[in-house]
Image (cartoon, coloured by chain):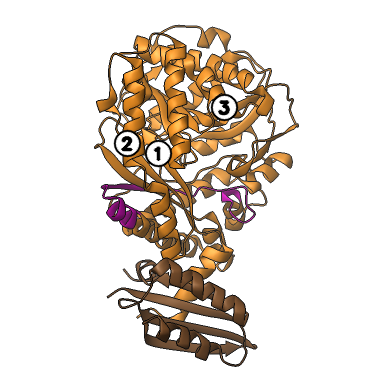
Chain colours: A brown, B orange
Amino acid sequence: MKKSIITVVGKDTVGIIAKVCTYLADRGINILDISQTIVQDYFNMMMIVDMNNAKKPFGEISDELAALGEEIGVLIKCQREDIFDKMHRI
Amino acid sequence: MINMYEVEETNKMIEKENLDVRTITLGISLLDCIDSDLAVVKEKIYQKITTIAKDLVQTGKDIEKEFGIPIVNKRISVTPIALIGGACCKTVEDFASIAETLDQVAKEVGVNFLGGYSALVSKGMTKADELLIRSIPLALSKTERVCSSVNLGSSKCGINMDAVKLMGEIFLETAERTKENDSLGCAKLVVFCNAPDDNPFMAGAFHGVTESDAIINVGVSGPGVVKTALEKVRGQSFEVLCETIKKTAFKVTRVGQLVAQEASQRLNIPFGIIDLSLAPTPAIGDSVADILCEIGLEMAGAPGTTAALALLNDQVKKGGVMASSYVGGLSGAFIPVSEDQGMIDAVLAGAMSLEKLEAMTCVCSVGLDMIAIPGDTKATTISGIIADEMAIGMINQKTTAVRIIPVIGKKVGDMVEFGGLLGYAPVMPVNQFSCDAFVNRTGRIPAPIHSFKN
């Protein structure tokens, strides 16, 4: 399964999760895991998602998520899980 | 499953500590382009490279986006051109025209450097080798992206002193021909002892004759990551220090391994090696000299520098070999002057001399790299500097190199600007005593004895 990691970092505001999740649902991306904390007013979220049935190619989704982030005022990054897996697991 | 802390650590390395994949280098054999007709050779070279490398740059960009890791350079290395042009090139202009073809191809496929305008003359020079070497100044002045290298010696064959003498003159001539741009041509010219066949880093990359038709080699880097990791263990024992470097090198190399595998799969070209090097850039915080300072030196060049560098180099390799089964190329810490802000600062502060740099090359990767010297330095003196460096490589069975820039019209203390990743450097003083009589002897230095190690 092609898993990806979405990270959202930025100043906390109403509806960040809602907007990101709505976007993902519309594009056929399934959320497998979410962890989220707020440190000193800073919103910090990591999602593990499954993009196997995504309606668009990875590059476009990544660009659109970054644009969505700009709209909300947070930084959204989307990366394939492999880079973290390789680095932190033997 | 991957947790938030791990994701944050990786992304911090990329965003704040300049972790990147320094280069994906596609090695292409040109042996099947040999012909006795120069025009045919050039056409075949053009066809072969543009066919194999057509997707290289785009694939690099795709990988960059999907994994969120910058891949700074996409490059090509080819079979040493002295071998390819031997049958058809009768003049230096003939050879230089192949360089122009390579330059054109590099621009067309979008790579920023193409290496392999090279000759391997560790024992002797064929006519073609000599002709190619003599064409280097012309070739480098007429091209933008072509890099040239010459292997002058090896632990098995000794040092070809005739070629060393010739290269001293070639360095000066190249500098002269590119003097309008601070003798930039010399930044794309390097001489080696024990040159590796699979080095992905420029200017010394070429595709060795022992390699297959096409291969992907990847060079990783991350001096900033190592430095940041070491900030957390200040004042602790050598054991803790070494452990920290090893762990960091492992993580950095794994990223390179991942990128190499992906690139190899997508381009359908076999994966060759990962080059585990700490390669600095002029960007602040991307410096090998800063790591040496973090280990405990006031400035790079202070007493203890060679020991600190030896330790760093060894731990990087120890961590890296665990992360990839195929490690090759140069693999170690690079200590270029102009490409490393910490080194530039050390030279400006008077902490670093050419002699100390030479000592440092005994324990780390490559050698005297990107060092600006006065433009009025004698050719024989440059040959002497080269011979010293080649001797270190030959006796210690390691790769050493010299990429030195006699900047025409500049004196000690002047600043030279090369631009981009090549950075800038203060002109360093050179020992003024003559070695004419030594360099002017003819022949070669015999291979060293491989026993009675002391």
Residue B28: which numbered mark, if any? 2
Q: Is residue B106 left or right of residue B376?
A: left
Question: What is the distance, in whole Å, between disc 1 and disc 3 at their CAs?
Answer: 19 Å
Picture quarter with the C terminus of chain B: top left
- The image shows a total of numbered marks equal to 3
Q: Chain of mark 1?
A: B
Q: Which residue is identified by label 1? A: B76
Q: Confirm whether the magenta stretch covers residue B273.
A: yes
- Could you tell me residue B278's position as x and y percent? 49, 50
- Could you tell me residue B28's position as x and y percent? 32, 36
Q: Secondary structure at mark 3?
A: helix
Viewer-closest of B41 and B158? B41
- Could you tell me residue B180's position as x and y percent? 68, 25
Check the image and report above or below for B213 versus A75: above
Q: Is residue B265 left or right of residue B376?
A: left
Residue B186: which numbered mark, if any? 3
